[in-house]
Amino acid sequence: MHHFHYQAGELYCEGVPVPRIAQAVGTPFYLYSSATLSQHYRVFEAAFAGFPHIVCFAVKANANLAILRLFAGLGGGADIVSGGELQRALQAGVDPAKIVYSGVGKRPEEIRAALKAGILLFNMESSQELEAINRLAGKMHRKARVSLRINPDIDPQTHPYISTGLKKNKFGIDIERALEDYRRAMALPHLEVVGVACHIGSQITEVSPFVEALTRLKELIARLQDRSIPIRYLDLGGGLGIRYDQEEPPHPSEYGGKILEKLRDLDCTLILEPGRVLVGNAGILVTRVLYTKASEAKRFIIVDAGMNDLARPSLYGSYHALRPVTEGRRPQVKASLVGPICESGDFLAKDRKMPDFQPGELVAVMSAGAYGFSMSSNYNARPRVPEILVHERNFYVIRKRETYRQLIWGERIPEFLK
């Protein structure tokens, strides 16, 4: 469900025509619907009503301050994986007591900042990390609340680059050695063991992998409790998928219902880390056609957005629906929608049926709210695009387009080259 629709032949975001925004800010740009973001959050939250829980938005999916503030205002927390994401969450007004810190490579200065902020807990990913956080917490005369992120060896049936719960993945602690690491953590004086965590992957379109992972975690929790290791928090991570093309992911209510069936006998607070499911279909990338060209073998539609703006198609071969911003009769053609980047891998859609877009037309690349801007770069010395948020009949620039001057900020030519 989203609030992008046609009205009088033009694509609207809530009550604002997309061409009006394009005229004001230029192209390309990311465009988000606040109504869709709010609706998705509330639906996900409602799926777990009646059971103690915290919804911690996965900041890596979309780190814009305005979006983080919107979720914080609805009662949400944050799942972070870096010191920069911590700073963003705090700046946006997220309650530190609702922030969980995951990730395999936390640096000392990032750990110190999180301890100083008083976050809810760290999700630990290795034995050496236990030692490091204990040492840093001791120097700060604090006690760090920790969960151990367990790798349950579950295949989430998703793209291998976004699968995180198999033994071959870099994430988490092997479930078979978890008891040993829990005993080690309990013995460290500056750690407070409070939970169990896992995250098996992203864009998962079946409930069964989540249920299977939860079954294994419950068995581990029972073994921990038998050894007098109390578990107050169970972090199930995120990963629930969305519809990009023909996928049929479960509704959050179905997902929540299956999870809660398995949790009724547990006395703990559930932590959830949704990302894509909240923001993916709440955002689009708007780009303008520059040229078309054809050979005997291929047809190309060249637009002003490239793989530096939206990396997912080049990185994962992912599908994003393409819609004309202005409706009209046009034939369908087999073509590739490509950008200006000097790479053959620069495409937003490859060898697909699509409208026969012509120079000057605006194209909406759908379902781009997650891992769109957050994965963008300045490759080919291209300024990153603006982000726009619509609320009812108004739109707001929540990130300005970068300038060429900003591209070289911080760079210096040393004296010997002058």
Image (cartoon, grey):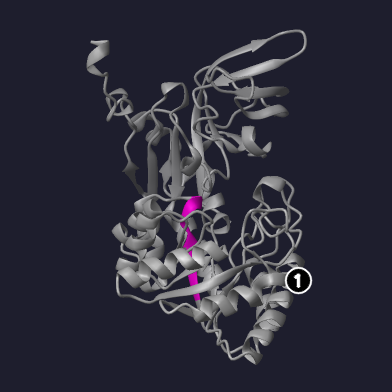
Q: Residue 212: image x %, image y %?
A: 75, 71
Q: Answer left or right for 166 relative to 54.
A: right
Marker count (numbered):
1
Which of the two residues, 233 or 337, is positioned nearer the viewer here? Answer: 233
Q: Position of residue 43 (x, y in %)?
A: 55, 69
Q: Main secondary structure of the magenta part?
A: strand
Q: Residue at x 62, y 59 (%)?
A: 239
Q: Quadrant of the N terminus?
A: bottom right
Please identify the quarter of the rendering in which residue 398 is found. Answer: top left
Does the magenta run of residues contain 57? Answer: yes
Where disc 1 sits, the SS reads helix
Residue type at numbered disc 1 = Glu
Q: From where the camera sits, is residue 301 visible?
A: yes
Residue found at x 76% / y 55%: 157
- Magenta span contains residue 102: no
- Circle 1 residue: 212
Please provide percent x and percent y for residue 235. Answer: 56, 72
Residue range (magenta): 54-61
Residues 223 and 159: in front is 223
Does residue 77 show up? no
Rendered position, 394 above or below 187: above
Residue 322 x, y percent position in the rendering: 62, 35
Q: Is residue 190 left or right of residue 309?
A: left
Q: Is residue 194 above or below residue 7?
A: below
Most distant residue in the top direction: 296
Asked which quadrant contains residue 175, the reply is: bottom right
The residue nearer to you, when weighing 36 against 370, is: 370
